[in-house]
Amino acid sequence: MDMKINAENRAQTGPDKAAWPAIFSLSLGVFGLVTAEFLPVSLLTPISADLGVSVGAAGQSMTMTAIVAAFAGPGIVIYSKRLDRRHVLLGLTLMLVVSSILSALAPNLAVLYAARILLGVGLGGFWALSLALAMRLAPDAILPRAMAVIMTGVSLATVCAAPLGAWIGATFGWRYAFLLAAAIGMLTLFLQFVTVPSLPAKAGASLASLIGILRRPIIRVGLTTILLVVAAHFASFTYIRPFLETVPQFGITEISAILLVFGIGGFFGNILGGLLAERSTRVALATAASALSLATLALFAFGTVPSLAILGTVVWGVAFGAVPVAAQSFTTRAAGDEAESAGALMLTTFQIAISGGAVLGGLLVEMQGAAGSLIFSAVAALAAASLIATSGVAKNHAASSPSRSDLAGSDIA
């Protein structure tokens, strides 16, 4: 597929050396944001009891964060386009601090919802800008490695957020878990203030640029692939506990251990995804989607065998752990100097896929039982792998270390 992109639309150059302290501060920032986002998962029961509401009503605090993030990302990118990106980043991190403190002090559900909405704005803005920030803090040749470092924060939060929140909630009370998130945010704010250089605004995003970048075939291929593979994951992962309880029939202790190993697998998958993306973002994304498809198909076929159920779940964790860094690297390479617009679109795609996948998975589980969503996940992930593998786009070899302008003006094959 011939995907030639106009070079003059992407004339952005990266730094000569990576600003690693700043990159690590971004990783800590995303760790804090994702930790705060998923803390309610293990705290819904005490939150609902303390605030005098149902578990379902308390659970909507997570839904609000995801929905707001989906719309806030493009909005932040468009309306902050004339501001120094350093100042925007500090403002978004401050939202993490304020929202976490508000959550910890919330006297009722309305205040908790307001705090979670504020977190959604910070989360959406950070994700939308993360691509462009990485491009301005790392040279082209190691851009996937820089993205992998940033995404390590996601992997660690995925492993730590739920068990840490549960332990703090049981030991000190659920409000202290959010105070910990606020402390992480304050540390992040300090480190970003010290390490992140001034990043004056360049050609900013607008509604026209969002529409314009959607017209690029390479971007449409990438977003469709991301939509399919993320929906495939959340359609089944949202309901993995009932699957593990009813099909291989694990107890709660075994399930907790399996989910911990799933998260650890995701951590190593993130590293592997970054290494693969340095050679070819297309191969990295196709490999991750293929492995996810095989893992969910194996769970459907052999899930009654405990050892195979564990193995399939671990492979699944490694596979999906590679998806975010591969997707970010793919989009960064494809977007050039429109990285902020592409990042906003990718964020929205992720959030739609998360919500849509969970809803569809729920319907399938209701109709076909705990394993019902796994076939959909296998087919959707395979479709994602086939689409990106046959598109002939984003084949960026680290050996040639092309510049952003070179990538922009060439066939990304």
Image (cartoon, rainbow, N blue to C red):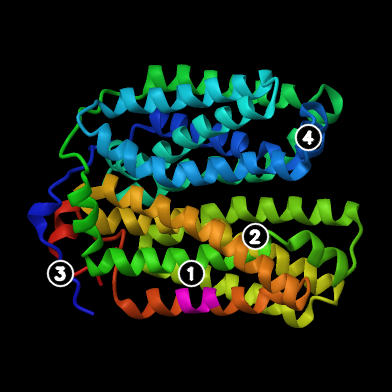
Q: Quadrant of residue 78 in the image?
A: top left
Q: Which residue is disc 3 drawn over?
A: 4
- Residue type (three-letter) at the residue carrying disc 3: Lys
- Residue type (three-letter) at the residue carrying disc 1: Leu
Q: Which residue is disc 2 drawn over?
A: 317
As helix, strand or loop, the secondary structure at mark 4 comes to: helix
Q: Position of residue 307 (x, y in %)?
A: 83, 71
Q: Quadrant of the C terminus?
A: bottom left
> Is tag 4's residue or tag 3's residue first in the polypeptide sequence?
3
Q: Which residue is disc 4 drawn over?
A: 48
* Numbered disc total: 4
> Is tag 1's residue or tag 3's residue first in the polypeptide sequence?
3
Q: Quadrant of the N terminus?
A: bottom left
* The one of 344 and 323 positioned closer to us in this rendering: 344
- Residue type (three-letter) at the residue carrying disc 4: Ser
Where does the magenta region start and end? 380-384
- Residue type (three-letter) at the residue carrying disc 2: Gly
Gap in angstroms between the C-alphas marked 3 and 2: 35 Å
Residue at 60% x, 50% y is 267
Gap in angstroms between the C-alphas marked 1 and 2: 17 Å
Query: Crowding at label 3, few (<14), some or many (≥20) Cα neighbours within 10 Å?
Result: some
* The one of 30 and 177 positioned closer to us in this rendering: 177
